Amino acid sequence: PLFLYIFLFYWHFLNALFTVEAPQSLYTVEHGNNVTMECTFPVNGKLKFRDLSVSWEKKDGLKQVYELVEGEENLKNQHSDFRGRIKLLKENLNLGQSLLQIIDVKLRDAGVYRCVIVYGGADYKTIHLTVKAPYRIINQGVVSTGHNE
């Protein structure tokens, strides 16, 4: 039993060392452009995909943005706001980077996102996305009717 207690103590301690980081906590993007948001996690050697779960969710109403469960992509619960516009750059997972790309950003995409990583331990970070509507110059002109008065 002593071994079990020691194991549980150290397992809890090691689990506490697992931390997710957000190198950038605020992203600003123009409406219609793409944005790639990032959170990082410790890999320690070769990534074991079957042990990895990644979830990106938008906090207002807890909208599911993207989910990878034990190495398998699961888009069944993805909110309709994001369907067809989300990409997780899987090749970067080996480097301990969860890169979420939103294509053709909409004004409704603005808000707070949560990046949750489970890999041995579990942790999350929040990231803010601001969407700016582009300012366009409006050209005004007078169309002549063709009558000179």
Image: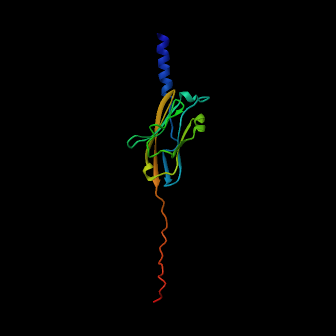
Say whether residue 2 is left or right of residue 60.
right
Q: x%, y% of residue 102?
A: 51, 47
- The residue lying furthest to the top in this view is 1
Q: Quadrant of the C terminus?
A: bottom left
The residue drawn where x is 47% and y is 18% is: 8
Total marks in image: 0
55 relative to 148, above or below: above
Q: x%, y% of residue 83?
A: 48, 44
Report the coloring of the rendering. rainbow
Q: x%, y% of residue 20?
A: 50, 35
Pick the front one: 123 or 56: 56
The residue drawn where x is 53% and y is 50% is: 34
98 relative to 143, above or below: above
- The residue lying furthest to the left in this view is 61
- The residue lying furthest to the bottom in this view is 149
Q: x%, y% of residue 98?
A: 54, 38
Classify residue 96 by image quadrant. top right
